[in-house]
Image (cartoon, rainbow, N blue to C red):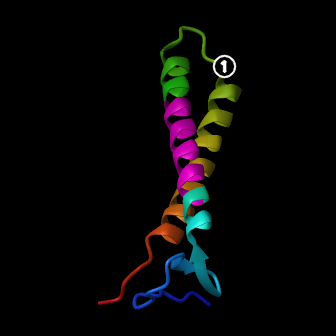
Amino acid sequence: MMRYISYFSGPCLHGIISGGLMSTSDDRSLRHKLAQLKQEHRDLDEAIIALEAATERDQLRLTRLKKRKLVLKDEIARIEDQLLPDIIA
């Protein structure tokens, strides 16, 4: 069950989390993890571009990097959804 807390006035709780509230330390750790994943995603993008530009392609490695990039994209989206709740208007 996902609950969005919009009228909470407490000093240390806000946001959403499955089944309840998310503390600021949870929020901070998710933002840190998100930044790490985005950096890894950018690094993979650069590696993929370099491999595609190479004269001799390692197709297996290229496929694995692209698959890892997709997994990262899904994980980034999942964390962003946790940090930015859907607001039904």
Main secondary-structure element of the magenta-colored stretch:
helix
Tell me residue 64's x, y (percent): 68, 35
Q: Is residue 13 above or below residue 3?
A: above
On the rendered image, what quadrant is the C terminus found in? bottom left
Left or right: where 15 falls relative to 18: left
On the rendered image, what quadrant is the N terminus found in? bottom right
Q: Residue at x 52, y 46 (%)?
A: 35
Q: Can the viewer see residue 66?
A: yes
Q: Amino acid at mark 1?
A: Asp
Residue 35 highlighted magenta (yes or no): yes
Counting labels gives 1
Q: Is residue 42 above or below residue 19?
A: above
Q: Is residue 54 above or below residue 78?
A: above
Q: Residue at x 53, y 11 (%)?
A: 54
Which segment is the magenta one?
Answer: 30-45
Q: Can the viewer see residue 74?
A: no
Left or right: where 26 falls relative to 49: right
Q: Residue at x 44, y 76 (%)?
A: 85
Q: Residue furthest left?
A: 89
Corner quadrant of residue 37: top right
Q: Residue at x 48, y 86 (%)?
A: 4
Per the image, the residue denoted by label 1 is 58
Q: Residue furthest top?
A: 55
Tell me residue 81's x, y (percent): 49, 69
Tell me residue 23's x, y (percent): 59, 73
Which residue occupies the foreground of this view, 80 or 61? 80
Residue 67 highlighted magenta (yes or no): no
Which residue occupies the foreground of this view, 3 or 45? 3
Corner quadrant of residue 9: bottom left
Provide the secondary structure element on which disc 1 rests: loop
